[in-house]
Image (tube, rainbow, N blue to C red):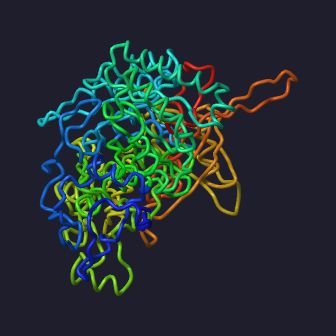
Amino acid sequence: MATAIFSNPKFSPTITTTSSKNHYHCQRRTHLLLHDKVQAFQAASLKLNPNPHYKKPQIVSCQSSGSESPDTEKVRRPEYIPNRISDPNYVRIFDTTLRDGEQSPGAALTSKEKLDIARQLSKLGVDIIEAGFPAASKDDFEAVKIIAKEVGNAVDADGYVPVICGLSRCNENDIRRAWEAVKYAKRPRIHTFIATSPIHMEYKLRKSKEQVIEIARNMVKFARSLGCDDVEFSPEDAGRSEREFLYQILGEVIKAGATTLNIPDTVGYNVPKEFGELIADIKANTPGIENVVISTHCQNDLGLSTANTISGACAGARQLEVTINGIGERAGNASLEEVVMAIKCRGDQQLGGLYTGINTRHISMTSIMVEEYTGLQVQPHKAIVGANAFAHESGIHQDGMLKHKGTYEIISPEDIGLERSNEAGIVLGKLSGRHALKQQLEELGYELEDEQLESIFWRFKSVAELKKRITDADLRALVSDEVFQPEVIWKFVDLQVTCGTLGLSTATVKLIGSDGKEHVACSVGTGPVDSAYKAVDLIVKEPVALLEYSMNAVTEGIDAIATTRVLIREETSDLSGHGSPVERVTRTFSGNGSGMDIVVSSVKAYIGAINKMLGFKDRTVVNSSEERIPISA
């Protein structure tokens, strides 16, 4: 996504590009697309290369030695000051997986899942965690609050603790609600936004430019008056806004007390040259800009979010808003792993020395956790974290890899927390013990608690009795089924099915409820899965619609583990004024299940989705409806 980003020779970061036959794929030329009028300004104040004698080192790859462990890898991180960064080359990473990422259809997260992800983001080392939209619902408010209390006060030995941020629209209720949720953190932040593009102001806000400026100025002042000294402001749809109006409104919110200015390409409309110029122009023309940090937030509607984000950083932005796996509204957001690894890989050579504080050894585990909790599967060829990211099938490529890994890999799997299983020398089977299992799981990027490991160990033993050899794919399926599951409201116990061509398919299901009581139901259906799902419905008594059902074998062979994913939605029936039933559709919820038996796997996935849905049943919506505001500010 980020390859061949730039092609305009006008956009060059005062670094001489040299060529050598020893350079590899990592060294593809990237020219920073800036307009002629800002080149001089860029060299003087963007400080892409403070040293005029800087020479690009000759390299063959971006791979690290692989000797450091995830917890011992040291990262440089300047002291946190809301409105400035002491090192001009340091780039803050603002993760919005829990806010914008959760707006992906089917990506509903429970409070527990949000807390787990926030803890993992802290391990990853993100500078700011946008924990949610506190005014959206009681559940969102409580989730942000608990993250602020727990993750926002977990200071490590080096003094690092993430900023905990809450999003709000430009109104007092939203801002007050956001502050009430984040104020428990050691470093709280309020992020408020209002639209500034002509189309949004005319059709959505129905307000004039003067009214929008007045609202923005007053709401930033209000946020500061609550005691919050870290306020971020976003002009929504800045990518389609008039430049002069942007300079004006941004100057006003700086005077009102904003410490970070986020420039969002809300609809993914901009291209890298255009977005780089936007950041550079804002940096050159906004009064008071030297007193704030410039941020980017790029959507991926044209597949350019990572490229635009890197372009913005090269033009002077020092905070980058991203999500794990690139999830988010519509086509998603700039991907954290892509942006961070691009900076780590090319920062010294092509990006003027830019760097982040991310511990990249935790990328793999974070990606897996978000994938499992949201149910949004990562495409196999996804950069950095896709299943094929480090796979080599071509004979020519395999030959090169056997001779030197740098021939076809610009980064190593160890850089993101993976080990090459074929080099570990461990083959798991029914005689393997806990230590071997734990080591193999760690090589796959999983860091599990002792209780979780114990649970997986006994599942592993039961599967190993039926399979001669347990593969990495099998282990991933087992971890998904045991660890990345919602809080248990209904627990699966037993299943018996009868099916075939001689009669109706019948299923008997036994579940244990949250009260500890056993519940048994029997039903018939068109097949074993249909009858089993109907039996579950008889027990749970919650009207749901099955929207999607998919199953995959994680390995080859008749003894493969099956993984099932389902997507459901809650349904209720209301009566319209004419007395006819009207279907009211609410959120969608995903569930995953794994097992040697495909029907058992299917039932586990269905119950997992129902448990996640029931976790939202007691949500008290603050707004008149469960509004999922389609913005990416």
Answer with left or right where residue 175 lies relative to residue 464. Answer: right
- Give the percent coordinates (x, y) of residue 465: 32, 62
Give the answer, above or below, for where 467 lies relative to 593.
Answer: below
What percent of the width, then of the height, locates residue 23?
26, 77
Q: Position of residue 596 (x, y in %)?
A: 44, 59
Q: Tell me the residue at 56%/21% (across/down).
A: 621
Asked if 630 appears above or below 337 in the picture, the reply is: above
* Residue 452 higher or lower than 140, as above or below: below
Give the total number of marks visible in the rendering.
0
Residue 560 visible in the snapshot = no
Residue placed at 71% from the left, 57% from the top?
Answer: 503
Left or right of 421: which side holds 112?
A: right
Looking at this view, is 497 or 87 the one in front?
87
Picture coordinates of residue 556 (x, y %)? 43, 72
256 lies left or right of 452: right
Above or below, comparing residue 56 to residue 274 in the picture: below
Identify the image quadrant of the N terminus: bottom left
Name the side, left or right, on which 52 lies relative to 142.
left
- Tell me which residue sits at (55%, 18%) in the image: 622
| Viewer-nearest residue: 9 or 223 | 9
Q: Confirm whether residue 234 shows in the render.
A: yes
Q: Nearer the viewer, residue 23 or 283?
A: 283
The part of the image, by quadrant, that contains residue 25 is: bottom left
Which of 117/48 is in front?
A: 48
